[in-house]
Image (spheres, rainbow, N blue to C red):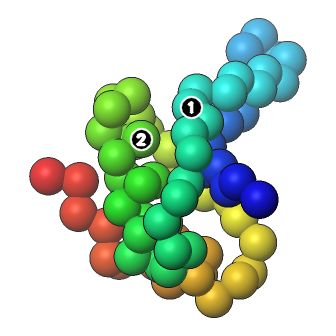
Amino acid sequence: MRSHIGIILVYQLNGTWVEVLVSCSLFSQRHTGVNIRSKIVEHIKYWNLNKFSAIVADNASNNVKALNVDEYDFD
């Protein structure tokens, strides 16, 4: 089975919800929190996404680790 990771933007424009698939790529690494976070940061930097209010994922321990906002370094 092949794994993928992606980013979908969801926002309102003139009162209408809009969903845009920004990126989707193969994710062949081990699904550790560190690897997931690294790929998310890679996508965020590539697309210059500097304003967001939420990141959503299931509560698997690797996702919880990956999405620990205190550990993000975008510099």
Q: Earlier in the sequence, mark 1 or mark 2?
A: 1
Residue type at numbered disc 1 = Ser
> With respect to residue 25, does 11 lie above or below?
above
List x then y, in percent, for residue 18. 78, 21
List x then y, in percent, for residue 57. 71, 65
Q: Residue furthest left?
A: 75
Residue 18 shown left or right of residue 3 in the figure:
right
Instruction: Identify the image quadrant of residue 12.
Output: top right
> With respect to residue 5, does 43 lie above or below?
above
Question: Which residue is drawn at the image coordinates 72% and 15% (left, top)?
Answer: 13
Question: Which residue is drawn at the image coordinates 70% and 23% (left, top)?
Answer: 20
Residue 69 in view (yes/no): no
Question: Which residue is drawn at the image coordinates 83% and 24% (left, top)?
Answer: 17
Q: Residue furthest top?
A: 14
Numbered circle sitting on residue 31: none
Secondary structure, mark 1, is: strand
Instruction: Identify the image quadrant of residue 63.
Output: bottom right
Q: Is mark 1 in CB contact (under 8 Å) with mark 2?
A: yes
Numbered circle sitting on residue 43: 2
Residue 62 shown left or right of residue 8 in the figure:
left
> With respect to residue 7, does 14 lie above or below?
above
> With respect to residue 16, does 26 lie above or below?
below
Foreground of the two, 34 or 12: 34
Q: Residues within 10 Å of mark 1 (few under 14, many from 20)?
A: some
Residue under pointer 1? 23
Secondary structure, mark 2, is: helix
Residue type at numbered disc 2 = His
List x then y, in percent, for residue 71. 32, 76
Distance between the Cα atoms at labels 1 and 2?
7 Å
